[in-house]
């Protein structure tokens, strides 16, 4: 639980929310392993995405994550102006599913791309992928983790995390219009925001309710 915070807390994801992760991933995969992927093909289950066995998926995952490419990801510049406005009324934190061994690289990237928005203490690692690409990680969600942090909202591109949060009474904003999160009828307490302009519009419309 985040203590001594009177403002409502918004938990914000990194990959494909703060960072253009899928775009960088498919470019790397196509260049290094001869795949013909597009952003719409992306799936966080890399074994399924690559159509390889778990051993090969693990080898590729280690190569990719150890390449330093995470530190070169492009970011969503539009988010900075939105954050500057939201910080007046909300406490902003980052909650990522990334493996904790990527903490240093991830923290440096956030502080470089989003200066003055987040401090080290604002960045949390749920550790869902600490065991690599496995069935447990694929079905796990951030619901309990962000509930224990006292979050009131979550902004995430993965439907499972939004549903997990909504089931625990946390308002969920499903970010983007990606191939992996398209769904006509969203569950209760889950709203779609396609970009950062819509994020700002949502909070301006709903206030701190």
Image (cartoon, rainbow, N blue to C red):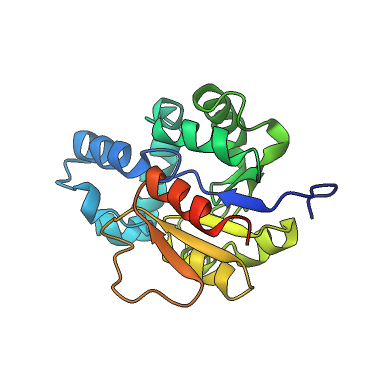
Question: Where is residue 163 shown, x and y percent of the image?
Answer: 50, 71
Viewer-proximal residue among 119 and 80: 80
Question: On the rendered structure, is 149 left or right of 21?
Answer: right
In front of the other: 55 or 110: 110
Q: Is 66 located above or below residue 186 in the figure?
A: above
Question: What residue is shown at x 44% (from left), y 27% (from top)?
Answer: 68
Vertical placement of 197 versus 106: above or below? below
Query: Percent x, y for residue 135?
Result: 47, 68
At a point 39% along the width and 50% down the height, the residue shown is: 198
Q: Image quadrant for the C terminus?
A: bottom right
Which residue is located at x 69 percent, y 53 percent? Answer: 8
- Residue occupying the point 30% across, 62% down: 48
Q: Quadrant of residue 41?
A: bottom left
Specify whether residue 76 is in view.
no
The answer to whether 150 appears left or right of 16 in the picture is right
Q: Position of residue 189 (x, y in %)?
A: 51, 72
Q: Nearer the viewer, residue 49 or 142?
A: 142
Task: Please state the horizontal and vertical placement of residue 91, each as a whole percent of the image.
Answer: 68, 44
How many circles with numbers are drawn on the protein?
0
Residue 182 visible in the displayed image: yes
Image quadrant holding the N terminus, namely bottom right
């Amino acid at each position: 639980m985040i203590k001594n915070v009177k403002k409502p807390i918004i938990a914000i994801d990194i990959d494909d929310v703060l960072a253009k992760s899928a775009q960088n991933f498919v470019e790397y995969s196509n260049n290094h392993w001869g795949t013909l992927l597009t952003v719409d093909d992306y799936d966080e289950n890399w074994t399924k995405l690559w159509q390889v066995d778990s051993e090969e998926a693990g080898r590729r995952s280690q190569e990719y994550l150890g390449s330093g490419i995470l530190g070169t990801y492009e970011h969503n510049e539009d988010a900075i102006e939105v954050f500057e406005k939201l910080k007046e009324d909300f406490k902003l934190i980052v909650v990522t599913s990334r493996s904790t061994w990527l903490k240093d690289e991830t923290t440096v990237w956030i502080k470089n791309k989003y200066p003055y928005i987040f401090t080290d203490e604002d960045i949390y690692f749920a550790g869902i992928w600490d065991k690599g690409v496995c069935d447990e990680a694929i079905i796990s969600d951030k619901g309990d983790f962000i509930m224990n942090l006292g979050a009131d909202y979550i902004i995430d591109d993965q439907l499972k995390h939004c549903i997990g949060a909504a089931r625990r009474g946390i308002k969920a904003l499903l970010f983007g219009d990606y191939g992996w999160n398209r769904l006509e009828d969203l569950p209760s307490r889950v709203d779609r925001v396609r970009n950062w302009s819509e994020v700002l519009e949502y909070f301006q419309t709903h206030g701190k309710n």
